[in-house]
Image: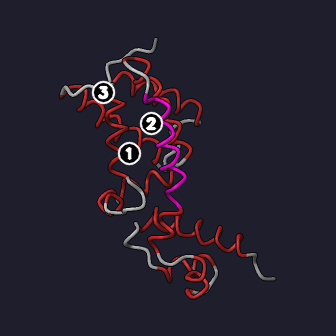
Amino acid sequence: MARSASAMRGQILESALRLFAVHGFRGTSLQDIASDAGCSKASLLYHFAGKEKILTELLTPARDALATLLDRVAGLEGGRLVEETVTGYVDLTLRFRREIRLLFEDIAEMSCHQDLDVMELANGLLDALAGRSRRAPARVAAWMVLGAVFITSATDDEVAPDEVLRAEMIRSALRALDHTPS
């Protein structure tokens, strides 16, 4: 029984995300994806014009969610800005674990990907985590939180149930940013 076009696209995307997470973007070929998805390379290319198009489709929902978070916190300042940004970032990393892992593990590749605007969004997130401060201590702490939240959410080791992990990640991130919730 033949799969529908949408089912085939979904299988290709799922295979690509899994393989990119294990082997990286550059370490995964179109043939690898096609074989894993159970289709021919020609069939894959019918659905996607290339690996970059697959990557764009995989990362666009996470990118859009991050852009929405940054829009949501744009008018906030001080403690409220930091709290909302930390909570939103933790929630995003837990929701898009594999996509965030791919994004950060291949950051050099992703930063060159024109369709994703990765660096602009990362800079906006960093700025919000730092409470829009330009001071070195705030910026360093923001960088540390940016990386630590990513690493913690992308780990394959099940540290705790998601609700416990979420609460501890938020608490620890706010502490690292020298911020106590209001």
Provide the residue span drawn in magenta: 58-74
Q: Residue 126's image quarter?
A: top left
Q: In the image, what residue occupies the spot 41% across and 38% down?
A: 149
Query: Which type of secondary structure does the marked residue at label 2 adopt?
Result: helix
CB atoms of marks 3 and 1 within 8 Å: no
Residue identifier under label 3: 132
* Disc 3 residue crowd, few under 14, some 14–19, many 20+, Cα 10 Å: some
Counting from the top left corner in percent of width and height, residue 16 is at: 53, 69
**Other-residue count near label 2 (Cα within 10 Å), few / some / many at <14 / 14–19 / ≥20:** many
Residue designated by label 2? 70
Instruction: State the residue position of label 1.
Output: 121
Name which residue type carries label 1: Leu
Whole-angstrom CA distance, mark 2 to mark 1, is 8 Å
Percent across and percent down for residue 80 are: 44, 19
Circle nearer the N terminus (3, 1): 1
**Does residue 86 appear to the left or right of 129 in the view shown?**
right
- Furthest residue toward front: 75
* SS assignment for the magenta stretch, majority: helix
Task: Measure the C-alpha gap from mark 2 to mark 3.
Answer: 12 Å
Residue 48 on the magenta span: no
Q: Is mark 3 on a helix, strand or loop?
A: loop
